[in-house]
Structures are given as C-alpha cells and as structure tokens.
Amino acid sequence: MTRDQMIAKLRQARALAHDVYRATDLPQIQLIVRHADQNLHWALWNLGQMDEIRPDLPGSIIKPKRAAAKRAGKKRK
Amino acid sequence: MPAPVSLLTPKARKAKFWNKLTETMPRKELDALHLVKLQKLSAYVYDYSPFYRRRFDERKLKPRHIRSIADFKRLVPLTDKQDFIHLQQKNPPYGDTITLPFEMVQHHVETSGSTGIPLAVPYSAYDTERVGESWTYGFWAHGIRPEDSFYFAFNWGNFAGFWSAYFGARRMGCRVISGGGADSHGHIKNILRLKPTVLISTPTFALRLAEVAKQMGVDLRDTTIKYTYHAGEPGPFALPAMKRQIDEAWGADSGELLGIAEIEALAPGCPHRDGVHLNEMNVFGWSMDPETGEEVGEGEIGENVVTSYTYSAQPLLNYRSHDLVRRTYRCTCGRTWAKFPGVVLGRTDFMVTVRGTNVYQTAVENLLGEMQEVSPFYQLVLEQIDSNDRMVVEFEPEPALSEAEWAMLAKRIADRIHAALHVRLDVVAVKPGGLPRYDLKTKRIIDKRPKEFRRALDR
C-alpha cells in the first residue's frame, strides 16, 4: 500500500468514526470512538498529514470525498 | 494451534527506524510541514488561549500574519517559565494559559520544582498519547523492542519527565514495572525478581543503584537489564565518563533523551550515542543568541527555543528553554532531524560571573565528565565574598584512587578548567560517598549567595 493509499484509508476510518460518534448517545461508545479517532489522527500526523492540531477542532475531519475533490481541484489548476 | 498473536509483523519488527518516513524526511518537506503546523498552532492558541490572545493583540499580531517560518520566529513573542508560573500563582492551578475546558484535562503533572515552585502541567488525553512518542523513537533507535520490559526506578509522583517515559513505553507495548514505594534496596530486589530488561532512571540514580547493589553483593552485570535509558540531568550522551560508568556497572547500553518537563520529551538519543535528535514531528526549534535575541547559524552554540505542537492543553510557543545547544543537520545515522551533539552544553540561566568571567555550570560539568578519575558525584558551591561570586568545585574521586592522589587530581582539574574557561576555580576532593545522593534530579548547584543575588535555578 502506498503512503497516499494509507492516508486515504485512515481518512475514511476517521470519517466512519465520526459518523458513529454523532449517531450514538451512549457515553461509553462516544468516548471509545473518540479515543480511536485520536489514534487515527495521530497516524495521519505521522504520515506527514496536518489537518488540525487536535482531532476535535472544527475543520479537522476531511472526509475522503472532499479530500479527493480537493486533490482533483488542485490537479486541474 | 493458531499462529501466536503478535504486536508487530516480522518485517516491522526488523525496521531500523520507528518511523523511517518521518525520521528521514527531506529537510524541504519537513520545513513545509513545520510551516503548516506553526500556522495551525498559532490560530489554535489565538482562538482558545486568553494568554496568547493577549500577547498577540499587544503586538497587533494575527495568526494570518505568519506566512513563513521566519515570520513565526520574529513575530510570535518569546515565552518563559516565569510567565506561566506567575499566571498559575495568580489563578491556580493553571491560570489563563490553558486552552481546553477543564473536563478535557485528564492528567496533571508538574516540573521537578527545584526552584521551590513547580510549574503545573495539564495534559489532555491526546497529549498523553503524544508527548511520550519521542521516548519511543529513542527506545527503538537504541534497540529496545516490544518484548522488552521496563523497570521505572521512580516513585510514581507527579514529575512530568517520568510520566512521559511511561507513556513512551506504553506506546511500544512493553511490559511496565513500577518501582513506586521501593527504596534503593527494594529496586535491586525488584529487578532480580521481576527480570526487566530496561532500566529507566536519572543517570546518577543508576550509579547510586550500582553502589547499593555492590553493598548487597549483587553484580548488576548478571541481571536481565540490557539497556538503561536516562533523562533529567546530563547523562551518558553528554558526559563520556557517565556513559562508561553506567555501561560498566550495569553491563548494559545506556541511552539518553533530552526533555523539558513543561513541554515534553523532545529529543531522543541518536544511535551513535553522542547526542540527541530533536523530534521534528512534535516540536519546532531554533537557536538564539541569548544576549541579542538574534538567530544563530548551524554549528554555533545558541539557546534552544522550542514550540511543541503536541502539548495542546497549555501550549508553549517560542519557549525559551535556556538550554545551550550546538544545532547541526548532519548525522550519519540517517536522521534528518536536527541533532544536538553532546546534548545540552550549558544553561543560560546557570551562569555565574567569577572574577569577571562568565562561567556556565554545564561547561564545568562537561570538563569534569571527561576526566576518568572523577566520579559522577560532584557539586558546585556558589558563595559571595566582598560582592564577588566564588565557585568551589567539590568532587568525589574514583574510589580506586588513593587519598594521596586527591590533591594532585584537584590541581589538574583546576588547571584544566583554567585552560578551557579562562577562570581559576577552587577545586576540593571529597571522600567517596561524602556528597549527597538524589532519587530524582541531582542538585549540582549549592547556592550560598544571598537570595537577591541569585538567578532562578531550576536544576
């Protein structure tokens, strides 16, 4: 798997984790998923990706579709 | 039988680097990443920290004004420990320097407080995941792997340095054994009984344990300890004599990390064992002339000014470490991260003027450390006589030396200091075992000068 592919998978995993966080009112599941997201954010950080300083800040989550669109937009320019 | 469970794949286990991608990242890519992080961090503190918003507004500085690394160095105000101590005292426990709601603070630690006022350090849960990572980089470079197990020869108090090492050992997935509640004899017994392979302690405490083991008739070279790893005071990568003595006493490879308790463990040891590399994934640093505030170039000695990206509960930007380092970007180990050969070469705030000459504590320590006949137990006593500072070097000679040789050795040390630092200090030999021993940071400076003439010593 290339670095870019790993990054895409991790972003996808973060988006899924966020979906679960928002969908549940179970405090236990929210906090477990939040912890998972921290580690996914850290994995991305250590692959040289920098969305935000913390995973819970607005703008931190870049959903794969948006990221792909952003990349495509850059290429077109 | 199913295949045994394993933390790492065989290929990952054989990797030379903890993360080759980050540790060998080309400088251009690293600097581009630094700029993005510095911009994001500046926006974060401006939005969430009343302290930084005030400091930025005083200068009419907005995060958007930071368009380059040079802008960040030049525009963002320097911070110092006293700023934070002052605000914490005014509004305990953390003052208005904190960026997160109180419920997000999951762990409280402190600096060692050798000045009498420990700095309170709040960590968010995410901070505890990240601030130990430098240790893990260092452990891996040193040869430590998940099957190793750590013995922490510490009381499990609030000291930040110890906790970050613990977070690092956890990150690698190693077994962790607490030395909490044990005295020196207890530590030796625990090591014999529980068979750890890595010792974590201050360097001088590793030597203290070696002394105690000897009295107990235990040869530490026969124990399971393969590695020792140290921080908190000048260690084996700063002082060759320290490295030799720890390695010999324990029959193990000693390692060292440079940390700043209020920031994080920021520079893991180089596998060449002659210095440390700044963890440039977590930290940004540059070197400054402490007198002029101007940046100094590669290879020149300057004060290490650091910014941590990963300590998000109480961020420290352009923080004056007061550590004097020689920064270089060349190392044959393959890492592109800045290297500090010899680790910390001196302290800007531990300077005393003796007979008109500025003398840094660590400069004297480095000279003592190079002399094989001098044990790692020594202290510098500061006095004031007729308004002049006087420094007396008290040291323990190696036990193998006869008492008749002590005076000659003291003279040789004084001559060596004179030749290197251009100042003549009084040097006095003390009977081996005569100087105090410390579990945590060794107190090297005994300041007997009137309070108003002292600098804020923190070591």
Image (cartoon, rainbow, N blue to C red):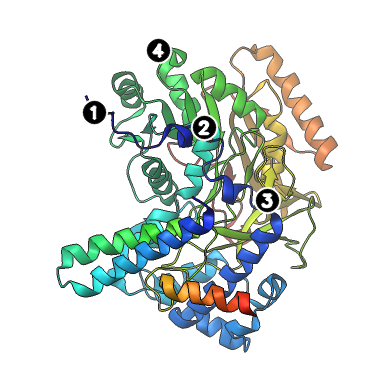
Residue B427 versus residue B235: which sits nearer the camera? B235
Looking at the image, is B445 positioned above or below residue A58? above
4 vs 1, front mark: 1
| Residue marked by disc 1 | B2
| Residue marked by disc 4 | B218
Instruction: Please give the name of the residue rendered at 69% of the width and 31% of the height, measured from the top-left corner.
Output: B368
Instruction: Please give the name of the residue rendered at 41% of the width and 17% of the height, measured from the top-left corner.
Output: B213
Q: Earlier in the sequence, mark 4 or mark 1?
A: 1
4 vs 3, front mark: 3
Q: Secondary structure at mark 1?
A: loop
Looking at the image, is B331 positioned above or below residue B433? below
- Where is residue B431? Give x, y as percent: 57, 21
Disc 2 is attached to a residue of which chain? B
| Residue marked by disc 3 | B338
Q: Secondary structure at mark 4?
A: loop
Kind of residue indicated by mark 2? Thr
Distance between mark 1 and mark 3 Cα atoms: 45 Å
Q: Earlier in the sequence, mark 1 or mark 2?
A: 1
Circles 4 and 1: CB atoms closer than 8 Å: no
Distance between mark 4 and mark 3 Cα atoms: 40 Å
Kind of residue indicated by mark 1? Pro
Q: Secondary structure at mark 2?
A: helix
Figure quadrant of residue B178 = top left
The answer to whether tags 1 and 3 share a subunit is yes
Residue B396 versus residue B108: which sits nearer the camera? B108
Instruction: Please give the name of the residue rendered at 68% of the width and 56% of the height, measured from the top-left corner.
Output: B348
Q: Is there any visible trace of residue B121 in the rendered image?
A: no
| Residue marked by disc 2 | B204
